[in-house]
Amino acid sequence: MKKISMHTLSFPIVIKRVVDDLVLSVPDLGVFRNVPITREKITVESSKSSTALISEVFKHQIMNEIEKLWCLTETHRTEKKWQPTPSNFKQSIQAGEEDYSLPEFTKKLNEFISVSENTVRREISRGNLRCYQTEGGHRRIPISELRIYLERLKSRDQNQEI
């Protein structure tokens, strides 16, 4: 088995049971592997969770798939594919347009409504605010998004009054 650094753990491997498959995935990379669960000897005794039996072959299948996923995350990390590339959104921002870091944007937004940085992060993850990431992974939000977001909030408040 290949020795893997602990940095690989920054991409978690998720193991779920879906119907008759065991799904191993790395959600951050969008990689999914299915391992079919074989039903060789199903008895009432072995189907109980406290006495469930897993065959050695199935254990080795799972370990091999985990090793493959782990190696995949290691190569992904060493090739530095996790670093963001300039998006179309960043390229579409006007050249002279000012942009803010997340704390700066929150301070500007607090002049109009009271919000926290976590609220702004949630709005970004929901897609209500658009931003781009710098090469260092920091979020930058253009000033035009402040105006668009405030207009959206006003229209939402007016719709709730009706």
Image: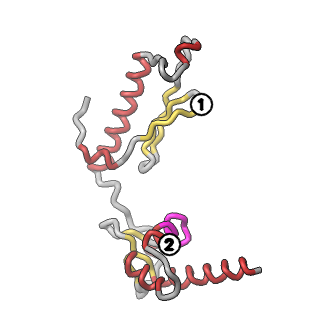
Residue displayed at 36% across by 47% down: 11
| Left or right: 76, with 120 as reference point | left
**Image color mode:** secondary structure
Q: Is residue 23 left or right of residue 84?
A: right
Q: Are marks 1 and 2 in contact (CB under 8 Å)?
A: no
**Quarter of the image containing the C terminus?**
bottom right
Residue 88 covered by magenta stretch: no
**Residue labelled with disc 2:** 130
Instruction: Give the x, y percent position of residue 67.
Output: 34, 33
Disc 1 is placed on an element classified as loop
Which label is found at residue 39? none
Element type at mark 2? loop
Highlighted range, magenta: 122-129
Instruction: Report the residue at 38% width, 68% height from top.
Output: 133
Q: Main secondary structure of the magenta part?
A: helix
Of labels 1 and 2, earlier in sequence is 1
